[in-house]
Image (tube, rainbow, N blue to C red):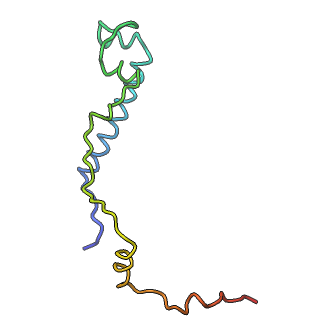
Amino acid sequence: MSAERRPSLFAEYLRRLFAAGGAALVLALAVFAASPELHHWLHADAGPASDDECAVTLFASGVSIAPAAIPVPLPAMEWRVVSHREVEQSLSGRAALPASAGARAAPELS
């Protein structure tokens, strides 16, 4: 059995269907927002001075979601101040370069 798992044919068609539907929705909103006549055809109470809150008007005005509407959880971290000695002690178990490694010169190319 191979390590790669290909998505099923149904999942691939469904993904393409949603992508095409999303592209068609954005195109339709752009067309209705650019043409007041088409917007009025969509619903009769639409007009140049109307304050309707339909998707076409919101799309045309570039409305965005307020950041306060999306709750973002804070990361679960704990900060504490450590001393230089604690850092040295925690790093002392790791492999270090030999003392003579810093005394060597770089090789010369001729």
- Residue 93 at x, y = what percent? 35, 85
Position of 26 compared to 110: left or right? left
- Residue 25 at x, y = what percent? 34, 29
Task: Give the residue displayed 36% in from the left and 18% down from the top.
Answer: 57
Quarter occupied by residue 23: top left
Quarter occupied by residue 42: top left
The image shows residue 68, relative to residue 60, as above or below, that is below
Task: Give the residue displayed 29% in from the left and 34% down from the top.
Answer: 68
Quarter occupied by residue 60: top left
Position of 54 compared to 96: left or right? left
Task: Tally the numbered discs.
Answer: 0
Question: From the image, which quarter does the C terminus lie in?
Answer: bottom right
- Residue 88 at x, y = what percent? 39, 78
Question: From the image, which quarter does the N terminus lie in?
Answer: bottom left
- Residue 10 at x, y = what percent? 23, 50
Task: Give the residue displayed 43% in from the left and 14% down from the top.
Answer: 35
